[in-house]
Image: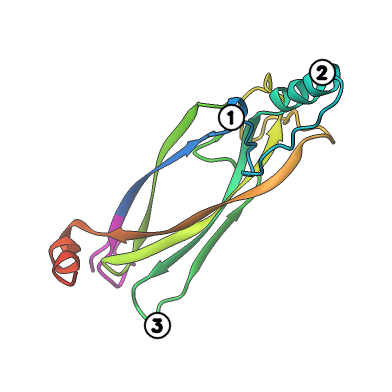
Amino acid sequence: GGGFGSDVPFASHQFAYRIRVENMNALASGVDVYGVEDCEYDTDDSILEEGEEERRRRSAVHLLGRTWKIEEDDDEAEVVSVHSPRGGVVGKQPVIRPGEVFEYMSGCELATSTGRMSGYFSMAMVHHDAKTTMVGDPTTLTNDDQLFQMPVRPFKLIASSAIADYTKDD
């Protein structure tokens, strides 16, 4: 036995992890979400103000879903993929404005005491006034909203029983 049910033929390890998504759109510094510096033009101020207003209008991001690749630290273990580009996170599809943070807790179960996860969030640049939605609610996305993927670098999953073993290898 072991695990959470009598039909689980291996010892299992539960992992909880906290994910933090922060909108670091630095409008005041002239750097947009993609890190491309604005060009300055010697032109009519009303055109520059119009561009600034458009940037402010589209400064929020809407987290629509996620895709995860979950790997156990075992050469023979299969890789589990969770592909949910419009499935939100913990039942929500939050809108995150500049300077705001959205955090959530989630978890997974592995047969090994260590593993790793990586993936990306499916997101859209949206109007600053857009509202957070719950999964299943109609979204307010428009044709003007820019869809993009926000990569999440690989991070380790280490069961408390494996922490001593993991740290002494370093």
Based on the displayed image, in which of its 4 quarters is residue 71 positioned? bottom left
Q: Which residue is mark 2?
A: 45
- Asked whether residue 96 appears in the rendered view, the answer is no
Circles 3 and 2: CB atoms closer than 8 Å: no
Question: Measured along the vertical axis of the image, is residue 104 above or below residue 99?
Answer: below
Give x and y (percent) for residue 143: 85, 36
- In the displayed structure, does residue 68 sit left or right of residue 85? left
> Dominant secondary structure of the magenta stretch?
loop
Mark 1 residue type: Ser
Give x and y (percent) for residue 119: 53, 57
Element assignment for label 2: helix
Distance, label 3 to label 2, CA atoms, is 62 Å
Give x and y (percent) for residue 165: 15, 68
Q: Nearer the viewer, mark 3 or mark 1?
A: 1
* Residue 164 painted magenta: no
Question: Measured along the vertical axis of the image, is residue 100 above or below residue 12?
Answer: above
The residue sitting at the front extreme is: 42
Which callout, 3 or 1, points at the residue further toward the start of the chain?
Answer: 1
Question: Looking at the rendering, in which quadrant would you find the C terminus?
Answer: bottom left
- Magenta-drawn segment: 1-14
